[in-house]
Image (tube, grey):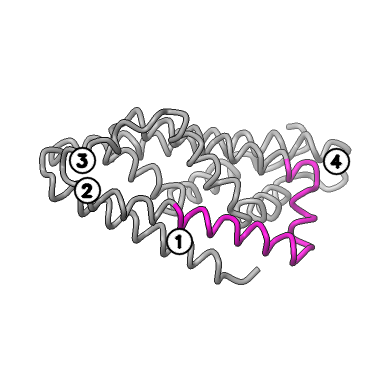
Amino acid sequence: MLGTHDLLLFVVAGLLLSVTPGADTLYIVGRSASQGFRAGAIAAFGIAAGCCVHILAAALGLSALLYASATAFTVMKIAGAIYLVWIGVALLRDSGRDVAAARTFAADASGKIFLQGFVTNVLNPKVAIFFLAFLPQFIDRGTPNTAVAMLFLGLIFNLNGTLWNLAVAYGSARISRNIAGASLFARLSKRAAGGLFLFLGYKLATSEQ
C-alpha cells in the first residue's frame, strides 16, 4: 500500500517501541499525575505534533542532513538538553513552595503544557534519526513515492503512539487521584520529576551520535 510492505509487522513493531518509556512518556506521566488526565492528554497531543515535524522532515530528507552533519546534530542535541534541564530546574524550584502555592502548578495553561510537550519532542534529534532509520525498513525499494510512503508510515506510527500515550495519561491520572490529597507526595513527585528531567538533559547532552 502506497509503496510499503509488511504493514502489520510495522504496526506491531511501532507499538512495541511506543510502550518503551522515554522522555515523552515521563513528561505525560508527570503532567497527568499532578494535573489530571486532561493535562496529560494535552501533553500527548503536543508530543504528537512534535512527531509530525520529525515525520515531515524525514519525508523531505532533512533528517538525512541532520544525520550526516555532526555539527547540526550537536547543536540540536544541546538545545534539547538545555530545554530539558530548564524544565527540571523549574520543577525543583516549584516543589519548594508551600502547599497553597504549589497548587498553582496545576493551573498551567493548556497552551504551555502543549508547547512543552511539542518542544521536548522536536528538540530531541534522536527522534529524527529514529524515523529516518525505522521507516525506510518498510518501504519498497525503487518506489517512486518514497516521501508519500514515509508520511503514510509516520502518521500510522504517530497515531498508534498517541493512543498509547493517552492510555498512559489516563492510567497515571487514575493512580494519582487516590493519593492526590497527600501534599507530601505532591512535593516529592515534583522533586523526582525535576531530577529526572535534569538527568534526561544530561544524558542527551553527553550522548554520542
Quarter of the figure that contains the N terminus: top right
The mark lying in front, picked from 2 and 4, is 2
Give the mark nearest the N terminus, 2 or 3.
Answer: 2
Q: Which mark is residue 200?
A: 1
From the viewer's perspective, is residue 91 above or below residue 81?
Answer: above
| Image coords of residue 112 (percent x, y) | 45, 34
| Residue denoted by label 3 | 176
Helix, strand, or loop for circle 2?
A: loop
Q: Whole-Å distance between the Cαs marked 2 and 4?
A: 58 Å
For discs 4 and 1, the disc positioned in front in the rendered view? 1
Residue, x 80% and y 42% (percent of image)?
A: 60
| Residue closer to the observer: 3 or 77 | 77
Question: What residue type is disc 3 on?
Answer: Ser
Amino acid type at mark 2 = Arg
Closest to the observer, 161 or 40: 40
Dot 3: few (<14), some (14–19), or many (≥20) neighbours within 10 Å? some
Q: Which mark is residue 97?
A: 2
Disc 1, SS? helix
> Quick one: SS at disc 4?
loop
Q: Where does label 4 land, which residue?
A: 143
Q: CA distance from mark 1 to mark 3?
A: 23 Å
* Residue 157 located left or right of residue 142: left
Residue at left offset 79%, top offset 62%: 68
